[in-house]
Image (spheres, rainbow, N blue to C red):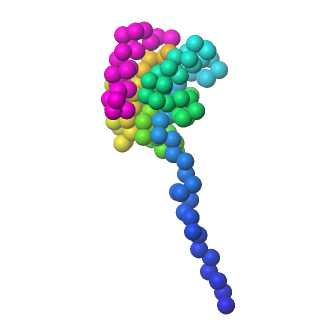
């Protein structure tokens, strides 16, 4: 008598999807401690931490490039979105919400305020 083995679990059950992906335009080791603290503060404003997001370094990106991460939201600092030049706006492309901001060292109070408005929209705060 031959017994056919079937799989109880499908591979997708084990995929861990990141809901938020942070894209930085320069290598992580070039980001100062003050800039990392600013990123933590920005993430904290929407109840996130660096431990709850994935961080990738890419100077230019599209949601398709990063589809393997399964993120529903992407926040970019100093990286450009290939399909749009809009900054500090919550835009949806390929069913992914994306906010593109300038690099950390360029963020002044006015730009931080614009970023906050976009983040509030993205996270429905």
The magenta span reads: 105-125
Q: Residue at x 65, y 20 (%)?
A: 29
Residue 8 on image: x %, y %? 57, 68
Q: Residue at x 39, y 39 (%)?
A: 96
Q: Residue at x 34, y 29 (%)?
A: 125
Residue 87 shows in the view: no
**Front-most of residues 66 and 124:** 124
Relative vertical location of residue 38 with respect to residue 123 in this rendering, above or below: above
**Front-most of residues 104 and 116:** 116
Relative vertical location of residue 47 with respect to residue 102 in this rendering, above or below: below
Instruction: Verify whether residue 71 appears in magenta.
Output: no
Relative vertical location of residue 5 with respect to residue 71 in this rendering, above or below: below
**Front-most of residues 123 and 101:** 123
Residue 104 shows in the view: yes
Task: State how many labels appear.
Answer: 0
Q: Is 95 left, or right, of 55 in this rendering?
A: left
Residue 5 on image: x %, y %? 62, 76
Instruction: Verify whether residue 118 appears in magenta.
Output: yes
**Front-most of residues 51 and 73:** 51
Relative vertical location of residue 86 with respect to residue 69 in this rendering, above or below: above
Residue 116 on image: x %, y %? 37, 21
Q: Is 8 left, or right, of 95 in this rendering?
A: right
Q: Residue at x 66, y 86 (%)?
A: 2
């Amino acid at each position: 008598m031959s017994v056919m083995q079937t799989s109880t679990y499908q591979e997708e059950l084990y995929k861990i999807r990141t809901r938020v992906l942070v894209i930085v335009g320069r290598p992580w080791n070039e980001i100062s401690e003050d800039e990392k603290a600013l990123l933590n503060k920005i993430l904290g404003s929407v109840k996130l931490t660096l431990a709850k997001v994935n961080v990738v370094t890419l100077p230019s990106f599209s949601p398709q490039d990063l589809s393997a991460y399964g993120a529903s939201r992407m926040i970019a600092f100093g990286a450009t979105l290939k399909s749009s030049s809009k900054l500090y706006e919550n835009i949806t492309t390929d069913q992914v919400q994306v906010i593109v901001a300038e690099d950390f060292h360029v963020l002044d109070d006015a730009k931080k305020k614009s970023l906050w408005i976009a983040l509030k929209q993205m996270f429905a705060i």
